[in-house]
Amino acid sequence: MRLLIFGNSGSGKSTLAKHLEKVTKIPHYDLDRIFWLDNNFQKTHPHKKSQKVVKEISFDDNWIIEGTYTHLLKAAKDRASVMIWLNKPSRECIKNSILREGSISDFRRSRINEYYDRKNGTSYKSHFQLWNSFSKSKYKINSNSYCIKFFCEGLLEHASVETFY
């Protein structure tokens, strides 16, 4: 399986990817680790270098790649067999971030809230375009409760084009 997971900050991409890695034994790649040069999120690798790394990973037989960066997701899209878009409301993303980290910075809160209005490669619009350009099996999960349903019912085994609210 070659799986792309994307969505807003705090939508649960890493949580889902780590869970699937544990269950399936398929390696998980966090695009933050490929995109950013350091853990301070201040400096990035050159875009072409990051895209090359993702493209190389995409030629493996099995992988789970998760992140927000559409330009990097596109580097693996053609080799992906399944796509999952965690398209959750901002309030759920903020709640998830607080539950995971104990608190949330004003910067992160505003970043999450700006998802639908941003005009860059981490926006709703760029994710919507990526979603529409993918013709293989895909899921759009629009709430935390359906993320749980997704796990419990083993829906990944029967992937098609489905949306869960």
Image: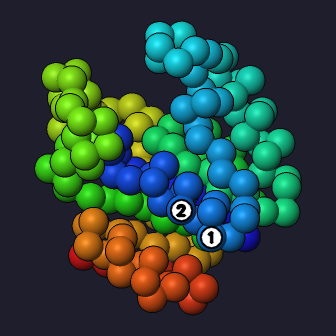
Scheme of image coloration:
rainbow
Residue at x 25% of width, y 67% of height: 143
Residue 50 locus on image (x, y percent): 69, 28
Left or right placement of residue 78 versus residue 160 in this view: right
Q: Which mark is residue 72?
A: none
Residue at x 21% of width, y 24% of height: 105
- The quarter of the displayed image where residue 156 is located: bottom right
Label 2 environment density (alpha carbons within 10 Å; few <14, some 14–19, many ≥20): some
Query: Observer-nearest residue: 60 or 114?
Result: 60
Write down the residue under mark 1.
23
Q: Which mark is residue 19?
A: 2
Residue at x 26% of width, y 73% of height: 145
Left or right placement of residue 49 versus residue 40 in this view: right
Residue 150 locus on image (x, y percent): 42, 78
Q: Is residue 139 among what the camera can see? A: yes
Residue 125 locus on image (x, y percent): 34, 47
Label 1: which secondary element = helix
The residue lying furthest to the front in this view is 102
Q: Is residue 49 above or below residue 7?
A: above
Q: Are marks 2 and 1 in contact (CB under 8 Å)?
A: yes
Instruction: Name the quadrant of the C terminus.
Output: bottom left
Query: Observer-nearest residue: 3 or 160?
Result: 3
